[in-house]
Image (spheres, rainbow, N blue to C red):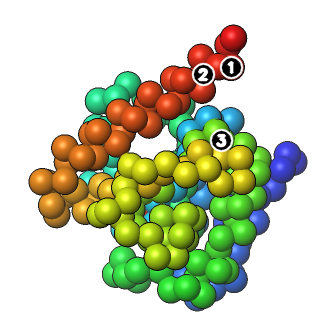
Amino acid sequence: MDAWNQLFEECKVCTACELHKTRTNCVFGTGNPQADLLFVGEAPGEQEDLSGIPFVGRAGQLLDKYLYAVDIPRESVYIANILKCRPPKNRDPLPAEEDACIEFLRRQVRLIQPKIIVCLGRISAMRLIRPDYKITKEHGQWVERGGFLMTAVYHPALLLRDPRKKEEMLIDMKEIKARLDAIKREETL
Ligand code: URA
């Protein structure tokens, strides 16, 4: 078995935190495991738990619209979450749950070797960029970390609650597409 499938198999039977007791499916991730662009959300919701696929519920459908708007095919990127199992009633992940789960994401990142990592929302940005990350103030700003270009955008679920933020989201997504294209151009030189 290759390293990727090995990791997936480990994830499916993980019992490192309490969330395994209530999961229907482990939501490992979806997309291209060789992607240049990796999106990292927070944790599966109800639809994701039922299907085993991240971002398939209402928030996911909105994410799809942004990907389409900036001409990034969903199947060309990889989409994962900080937590692979759904927290009950979609509550925020507990620090202990993140600690128990984060190694799966680290190993995914090592295998995918993306050029760009985009945090979807505050929880992901606080875990991957800085614990005191302020999404309202800092979304769309770029940092370099361990050889990756990183940024954070609003979580699509927040945009469903506060549509006034949609314009800023589109600006951030356009910049992600521009940076991705620039990387691709460099690769073909
Ligand atoms: N919200 C997330 O953060 N991740 C999903 O997979 C679905 C909704």
- Report if residue 156 is visible in the image: yes
Q: CA distance from mark 3 to mark 2?
A: 12 Å
Residue 86: % across, % down: 47, 73
| Mark 2 within 8 Å of ligand 1, using the beta carbon | no
Are dots 3 and 2 in contact, CB under 8 Å?
no
| Residue at image location 59% in from the left, 17% down from the top | 185
Q: How many residues crowd mark 3 within 10 Å: few (<14), some (14–19), many (20+)? A: many
Specify the label residue 184 is tagged with. 2
Residue 73 visible: no
Q: Which quadrant of the view contains residue 172?
A: top left
Q: What residue is disc 1 on?
A: 187
Does residue 122 sit above or below 20 in this rendering? above
Pointer 1 and pointer 2: residues touching (CB < 8 Å)? yes
Tell me the kind of residue under disc 3. Answer: Pro
Q: What residue is shown with label 3?
A: 114
Residue 168 placement (x, y as % from top left): 24, 47
How many numbered marks appear?
3
**Circle 3 SS class:** loop
Q: Amino acid at mark 1?
A: Glu
Residue 80: percent from left, percent from top = 54, 55
What is the spatial separation of the Cα atoms under label 1 and label 2, in whole angstroms? 5 Å
